[in-house]
Image (tube, helix red, strand yellow):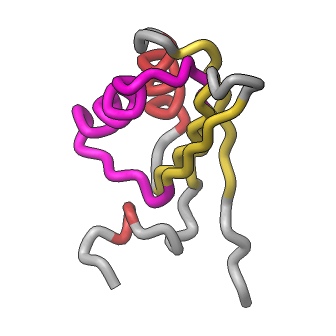
Amino acid sequence: MSARSDLDPFHPNPVACFSVVAGATPGVMPRVLEVFAKRGLVPCQWYSTVHGRRGEDLHIDVQVAGMEPRLREQIAESLRQVVDVEVVLTSEKRRALTA
């Protein structure tokens, strides 16, 4: 178990989910990751795919464990300012605690 249980993906705290749609340009992924890195956050999951008829869209799904709702919204707003980012959606998921 990690010493930082607040960042553990199995911790009962909420997991912030970010869905980013951007133009498929080489610099988009590092710019998106930088938004998290500047705050000392390491995503517990990152998944990206290229979409579109000619591969023109990049869909990035990022999850970060233990994030407060206010910080989630601040990060979403920062992601919306990234060059080539077109859409940012956020959600939250929680693990069910077993008895």
- Residue 15 percent coordinates (x, y): 57, 53
Q: Is residue 32 left or right of residue 16?
A: left
Q: Is residue 32 left or right of residue 9?
A: left
Give the position of the C terminus as an image quadrant. bottom right
Q: Residue at x 72, y 86 (%)?
A: 98
Q: Residue at x 67, y 68 (%)?
A: 95
Give the residues in magenta.
20-45
Q: Nearer the viewer, residue 42 or 55?
A: 55
Give the position of the N terminus as an image quadrant. bottom left
Whether residue 76 is situated above or below residue 30 in the rendered picture: above
Whether residue 1 is situated above or below residue 14 in the rendered picture: below
Residue projecting furthest to the right: 53
- Residue 41 percent coordinates (x, y): 31, 46
Whether residue 41 is in magenta: the answer is yes
Q: Is residue 92 left or right of residue 29?
A: right
Q: Nearer the viewer, residue 87 or 64?
A: 87
Residue 7: quarter of image:
bottom left
- Residue 79 percent coordinates (x, y): 46, 21
